């Protein structure tokens, strides 16, 4: 027989759970970035995520856990929810299975049993404190889902704070700030204002004495990034930065990510609807929760040039590698990419910059961990999701370094300010925007000079709807299919026919579809290869 506290919690959970019934027959899975599907199907899931967040916090001695309600790049009717661990990182992988189990529990009774089973197997004291903070993006389904989350937290007797509407990376930042507040290295003030102040100060130091960058126009995908970027720019001040925000209609909820935003620009390889850039001016697009960014410009012939996550990674790796060389501090820079990385970018990084590269599966959670193995780990997915991590030992080495000349001192100061400017918890479009602008202003480069570092191999990404995406299993960091049997051999046979050809197929973890990637020596060949590989999926 459970003790009275446990008993009371279980009966509260059972009681509240009846208000958040699981849709009959619906299956859920904690995927690339948490649960993500139609907002109307998520009420029970978000309630249950509240229960799990409370358990996770109790397991970690009351450290604060974050819950973000967002579907990021997905269409307006979708929504999603993901958990943030105490250092602002994605939920530890071993807990994803509990999240999936909770979400799929068939009855209220089964749910309370799962709750108790996790508590017992992990020795969690249900009478100990639980602290959770949460926020949401601008989607119409957000408020109702937040209400479900609050019920879950109340049922599990957790203390919570509602940070209302934030970008996803802002919530990651706040979680880390709260949990490091009483340590020797507090990350910052745990508030939205603290976030702006930290980034603005760092940007002003990094760009001090450099020419003021050209104006940049940012498409905010009609999402939360629009107002937040305007606020950040206000903190930075127009002496340092001129930014024009377009696609900032957050009240027109149906326009979120519609023919605009980072995912649209990257996958369609074209300008957002209605955006007409002047030649050689820098433009950027955020996604719906401002954790991804891609840049672009047009030339005098109005040709569109994309500067995606690979180009950002290469720019950052080059700049930081050079600064480290000037500083004289003994640190190694490494880069983490996924199968989507353009072949030319990997070649540039390894042959020209001579930095080590690790390849992981898609999902920033995988890249983040791999990049922690470097002193300075640059990780970006080609879709523009990424950041640069400075290890504790790298920061300490920089802080304690005794510079021998002003050049070394400058380089060390810039590196330390970059570590403050770049979000250390997760890929952050606003922080990455400032990083890129700062580097371009140091180098006195415009977008076309940046683009000259290497030439992308033409590539194409296609989304294919199949009967069951779970049937697609991969190996070798998603570069090869293991199942459906025989399909990889057919892809290999096609790829062989194309110069510099490469193609792979993987199931999306955020949409009900599989993705086909193809690259080759010419645009025509890349497109043809993508179509032929997609054709192999017909009927599957
Ligand atoms: C999420 C993940 C990214 C991933 C993207 C697409 O981004 O955080 O790491 O690249 O989904 O994943 P998939 O190809 O599995 O659908 P976001 O911006 O949607 O949160």
Image (cartoon, rainbow, N blue to C red):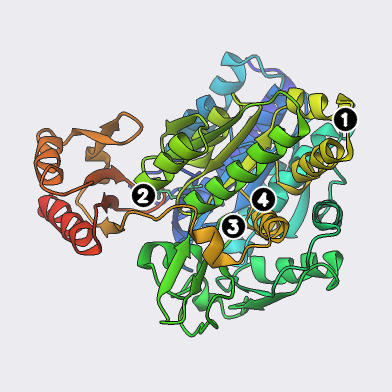
Residue 513 is at least partly visible in this image: yes
The residue singled out by tag 2 in the image is: 24
Q: CA distance from mark 3 to mark 1?
A: 53 Å
As drawn, 124 above or below 244 = above
Mark 4 vs ligand 1: CB below 8 Å: no
Dot 3: what SS?
helix
The numbered mark, 4 or 2, whose residue comes first in the sequence reads: 2
Which residue is at 47% across, 29% downward? 97
Q: CA distance from mark 4 to mark 1?
A: 34 Å
As drawn, 379 above or below 475 = below
Residue 418 placement (x, y as % from top left) = 75, 45
Q: CA distance from mark 2 to mark 3?
A: 18 Å
Q: Is residue 432 left or right of residue 465?
A: right
Q: CA distance from mark 4 to mark 2?
A: 34 Å
Dot 2: what SS?
loop
Which residue is at 36% across, 32% downward? 477
Viewer-proximal residue among 467 and 235:
235
Disc on res. 392:
none
Viewer-proximal residue among 309 and 318:
318
The residue singled out by tag 3 in the image is: 145
Which residue is at 52% across, 80% downward? 279
Q: Is residue 258 left or right of residue 494?
A: right
Quarter of the view holding residue 160 = top right
The residue singled out by tag 4 in the image is: 169
The numbered mark, 2 or 3, whose residue comes first in the sequence reads: 2
Dot 4: what SS?
helix
């Amino acid at each position: 027989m459970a003790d009275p506290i446990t008993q009371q919690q279980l009966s509260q959970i059972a009681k509240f759970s009846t208000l958040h019934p699981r849709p009959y027959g619906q299956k859920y899975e904690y995927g690339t970035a948490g649960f993500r599907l139609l907002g109307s199907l998520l009420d029970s899931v978000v309630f249950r995520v509240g229960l799990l967040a409370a358990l996770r916090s109790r397991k970690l001695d009351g450290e604060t856990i974050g819950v973000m309600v967002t579907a990021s790049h997905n269409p307006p009717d979708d929504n999603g929810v993901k958990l943030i661990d105490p250092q602002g990182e994605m939920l530890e992988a071993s807990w994803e299975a509990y999240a999936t189990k909770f979400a799929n529990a068939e009855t209220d009774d089964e749910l309370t049993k799962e709750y108790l089973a996790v508590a017992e197997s992990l020795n969690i004291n249900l009478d100990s404190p639980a602290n959770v903070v949460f926020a949401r993006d601008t989607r119409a389904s957000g408020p109702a889902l937040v209400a479900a989350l609050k019920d879950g937290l109340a049922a599990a007797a957790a203390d919570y704070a509602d940070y209302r509407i934030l970008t996803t990376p802002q919530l990651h930042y706040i979680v880390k700030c709260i949990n490091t507040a009483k340590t020797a290295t507090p990350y910052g003030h745990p508030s939205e204002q603290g976030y702006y102040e930290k980034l603005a100060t760092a940007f002003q130091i990094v760009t001090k004495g450099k020419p003021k960058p050209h104006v940049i126009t940012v498409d905010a995908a009609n999402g939360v990034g629009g107002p937040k970027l305007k606020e950040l720019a206000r903190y930075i001040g127009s002496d340092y930065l001129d930014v024009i925000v377009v696609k900032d209609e957050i009240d027109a909820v149906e326009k979120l990510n519609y023919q605009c935003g980072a995912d649209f620009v990257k996958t369609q390889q074209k300008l957002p609807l209605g955006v007409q850039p002047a030649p050689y001016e820098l433009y950027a697009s955020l996604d719906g929760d401002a954790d991804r960014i891609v840049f672009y410009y047009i030339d005098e012939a109005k040709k569109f040039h994309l500067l995606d996550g690979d180009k950002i990674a290469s720019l950052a790796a080059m700049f930081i590698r050079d600064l480290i060389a000037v500083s004289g501090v003994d640190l190694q820079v490494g880069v983490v990419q996924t199968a989507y990385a353009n072949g030319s970018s990997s070649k540039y990084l390894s042959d020209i910059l001579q930095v080590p590269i690790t390849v992981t599966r898609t999902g920033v959670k995988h890249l983040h961990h791999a990049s922690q193995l470097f002193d300075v780990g640059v990780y970006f997915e080609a879709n523009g999701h990424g950041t640069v991590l400075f290890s504790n030992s790298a920061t300490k080495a920089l802080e304690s370094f005794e510079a021998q000349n002003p050049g070394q001192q400058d380089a060390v100061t810039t590196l330390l300010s970059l570590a403050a400017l770049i979000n250390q918890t997760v890929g952050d479009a606003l922080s990455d925007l400032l990083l890129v602008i700062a580097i371009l202003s140091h180098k006195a480069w415009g977008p076309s000079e940046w683009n000259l570092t290497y030439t992308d191999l033409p590539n194409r990404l296609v989304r294919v709807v199949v009967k069951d995406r779970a049937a697609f299993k991969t190996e070798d960091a998603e570069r090869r299919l293991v199942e459906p049997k025989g399909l990889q051999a057919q892809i290999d046979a096609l790829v062989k026919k194309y110069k510099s050809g490469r193609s792979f197929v993987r199931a999306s973890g955020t949409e009900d579809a599989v993705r086909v990637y193809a690259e080759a020596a010419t645009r025509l060949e890349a497109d043809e290869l993508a179509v032929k590989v997609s054709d192999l999926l017909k009927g599957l």
